[in-house]
Amino acid sequence: MNETRLKAMGWTKKEIDHARKIFAKAEKNHPGTVSLQRAVFWLTVIVLASGVLAFVIELLPVILLGGTLLGAVMLFVIGSCLGLLFVHVAHDLPLGAHHHVGAVLLILAGCGIVFMLMVLMQAPFSTYGVKANPAILSAGLGIGLAIPYIAHWRVTRAAK
């Protein structure tokens, strides 16, 4: 809504503000918009979780052979990149508390699955003398995923 054009057409400030409120309320309450936003959010969460699992499974041999420190750093970087992607998509969506809880639980579940996969796949690599700690590696992934999300949540909460 271009305020200068509306003023040039004879609209008052009060009328412009009233029109803005009407448009904001209509956009916010439209059932199609709300269901689309929910669908976009949960689709993003599912794609993020699937992407993390697929990427980590592909890199698991490299991560386990690299040792605990290198693997944790790699998983932290991967998690941070995917966490930033999630924050970028979720930034424009009006999310309720249950969405935040669901996203955090999904992140934790994904880290638990990665942990189990690392424990199962570590046995073949132990013959090479490599002992990577799956708990530390999973924590690196979880922290990497959570930091952008928590930082975004704190910044937006402080801005209100």
Image: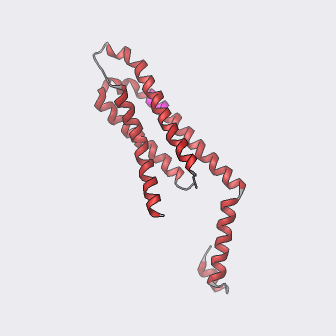
Q: Quadrant of residue 31?
A: bottom right
Q: What x and y, as percent, mark residue 127?
A: 31, 12
| Residue at 45% over, 63% down | 159
**Left of 49 or right of it: where is 151?**
left
Question: Is most of the magenta stretch helix, strand or loop?
Answer: helix
Q: What x and y, as percent, mark residue 84?
A: 45, 47
State the scheme by which the image is colored. Answer: secondary structure
Residue 159 higher or lower than 59, as above or below? below
**Left of 116 or right of it: where is 90?**
right
Q: Quadrant of residue 155?
A: bottom left
Q: Quadrant of residue 1?
A: bottom right
**Left of 94 or right of it: where is 144?**
left
Residue 82 higher or lower than 58, as above or below? below
Q: What x and y, as percent, mark residue 100?
A: 53, 47
Residue 153 higher or lower than 2, as above or below? above
Front position in the image: 9 or 31: 31
| Residue at 66% over, 84% down | 11
| Residue at 49% over, 51% down | 88
Residue 63 higher or lower than 37, as above or below? above
| Residue at 32% over, 36% down | 73
Magenta segment: does it hold 70?
no
Region in magenta: 53-57
Farthest-out residue, right: 31
**Left of 28 or right of it: where is 131?**
left
Q: What x and y, as percent, mark residue 38?
A: 63, 48
What count of labels does the image hold? 0
